Image: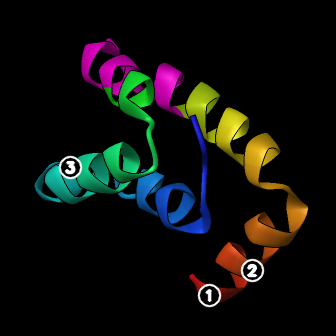
Amino acid sequence: MSWTRTSYDALFDWGVPAARPAVRKALVADGLEEVVRRLDQAPGLGVWWEITQEAAAAVGPGVVEASARDA
């Protein structure tokens, strides 16, 4: 599993159903198939929130801050 800025940014579009194919593609490209599985099986956004926290820890504060600035 290897979070990158691309997969980190894509994760935040998960809440938009039409964007999910692109999110899946970005996550799989970074080897995050297990994350896609967890998101697909999640009963609600609680799991998504947990994954966003895991992703933020993995990419570090520099990527998180850059992503927020660019949003």
Which colouring convention does the figure follow?
A: rainbow
Asked if residue 67 lies left or right of residue 43, the reply is: right
| Element under disc 2 | helix
Local crowd at mark 2 within 10 Å, few (<14), some, or many (≥20)? few
Q: Is residue 4 above or below residue 36?
A: below
Residue type pointed to by label 3: Arg
Pointers 3 and 2 in contact (C-beta within 8 Å): no
Tell me: residue 40, above or below residue 64. above
User: Disc 3 marks which residue?
Assistant: 20
Highlighted range, magenta: 37-48
Q: Secondary structure at mark 3?
A: helix
Extreme-right residue of the structure: 61
User: Relative to 23, is 2 on the left or the right?
Assistant: right
Distance Cα–Cα, label 3 vs label 2: 23 Å
Question: Mark 1 = which residue?
Answer: 70
Q: CA distance from mark 1 to mark 3?
A: 21 Å
For the point 75% across and 54% down, the residue is 59
Amino acid type of the residue that numbered disc 1 sits on in the rendered structure:
Asp
* Visible residue check, residue 40: yes
Q: Nearer the viewer, residue 36 or 17?
A: 36
Q: Position of residue 69 (x, y in %)?
A: 71, 85
Q: Quadrant of the N terminus?
A: top right
Residue under the point 66% across and 75% down: 67
Q: Position of residue 2 (x, y in %)?
A: 60, 44
Q: Are marks 2 and 1 in contact (CB under 8 Å)?
A: yes
The residue carrying mark 2 is 66
Q: Residue at x 34, y 56 (%)?
A: 26
Q: Quadrant of residue 62?
A: bottom right
